[in-house]
Image (tube, rainbow, N blue to C red):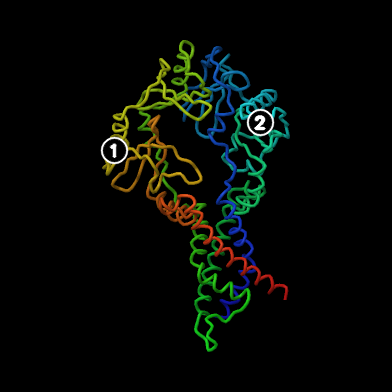
Amino acid sequence: MIKFLFLLHRYLGIALGLVVSLWCLSGFVMMYVQFPDLSREEQLRGLNELDVSACCTVPENFSDIELDRYRVEMMAGRPVLRLSAGFGQYVIDLRNGEYLVDIPERDVHAIAETFAVNQGLAADVEFLDVIDKDQWTVYGGLNPNRPLFHYRAMDPATTEWYVSSVNGEIIQMTTAAERFWNWAGSVVHWIYPTILRQNTGAWIQVIIWLSVLGLFLTVIGVYIGLRQFNYRRNGRRSPYRGAMLWHHYTGLIFGVLTLTWLLSGLLSVNPWGVFEGRSFSAEVQRIRGSALTYRAAGDSLTALETHALPEGTVRLEGSILRGEPYFLAWNRDGSSRRLNTQTLRHSALPESAFIEIASTLRPGEQIMAQGWLQDGDAYYYSHHDEKSFPVYRIQYNDGERVYLDRVTGQLAFAMDNNRQLSRWLFLGLHRGDLAGWMRERPIWDLILLPLLAGVTLGALTGTWIGFKRLLR
């Protein structure tokens, strides 16, 4: 049996050593460079200031569908109404009430050029091609936007961006540095080549079974390493020399950490639904108080014909809170103000509104604590991705937590028990953010870098030994 375990570890190491080594090496890159993602601030910065002088005509025969949200913004020199419902979006030209099924190519080019000018990119915009997907737009969440128009600016960063031919929105932006480092980082770490990632089911299965085999390999290696670590007549504790000695000791020191990283990496794809959380849709609906419909959205736009928007507004977002509609006016710098839909005047939520929302959010569940959170806690915090503060936090006796946006009162974040378990077993173990002080830079770097270096050395020495064995 022991001989079999030695052979199994050797040949599994030959098969998987390079994969584990690449996971480790790409982890160094991912500590500092994230996968490209167009932020809301970048999207807002690319918009022109709202001009509603020719507003607002909406179609009378449009079905009264229930909406997730709606927005008014400029697109190719005209105000449009964007209705988001489920997985799709409807776009209406507010000058004439026309429903835009597809965006004309000339308008797509105009949208791309406007975005470039507002982002401060080079005036010379190059149209590259029309694509369905590429390495930076491969994930399924972008499917309703395809096909995509792909553009490039000859600015110092060689910025590229993509415009949806379906709704005219900018859906992704990358720079040359992001593309370069992500080929060495996220694409390798997530096993993310387009040919595999475009088939989500196959991609997840590859991640799951590579991780399971990696765990099996590491468990066997830790057992063998402990078994071989004994006093000998020559005074040595290890029977190995050279690369084998390095592999033995790095495995002993960092083997358990390797296991935790492989396990937490496996859990990142929520295998077999182990961390499947609930949707909190009931809480969202209680906060709204009633359904947000197309008819209500159309009626709220009448104020734009008689009242002036706050200066600098590039996007007007509409929703409903406790049965009352409101607007959220966004500026290009990412700041927002809550407005009354009838007067377009600033309408901040009082403290009492948050207390009332908390009292009706989860009927029958006792609130353990509630109040403003000025900085991050164990579940809502900034690390790689920035969170907005302050937020109104509500903690329940069953352990669940709900966080309300300070401007709108809407659900900003929520943690049920399954998500809390995922936070510790995936994020906590994989990113090393188990406590607030560990997330502080450069403390986080000083902890993670040597640990990752040790695990990487163990993987590389094992890979080297395996390939040397093959060459024999």
Pick whichever, 43 or 417, lies toward us. 43
The nearer-to-camera label among 1 and 2 is 2
Pick whichever, 352 or 16, lies toward us. 352
On the image, numbered disc 2 is attached to which residue? 121
Image-quadrant location for residue 144: top right
Say which element carries label 1. loop
In the rendered view, would you say 67 is above or below 25?
Answer: above
Q: Which quarter of the figure is the N terminus placed in? A: bottom right
Residue at the image position 36 percent from the left and 32 percent from the top: 287
Image location (x, y in percent) of residue 6: 58, 77
Say which element carries label 2. loop
In the rendered view, would you say 466 is above or below 284?
Answer: below
On the image, numbered disc 1 is attached to which residue? 363
Residue 315 visible in the shown view = yes
Q: Which quarter of the figure is the C terminus placed in? A: bottom right
For residue 59, the mark is none
Does residue 455 appear left or right of residue 400 in this picture?
A: right
Quick one: label 1, few (<14), some, or many (20+) residues within 10 Å? few
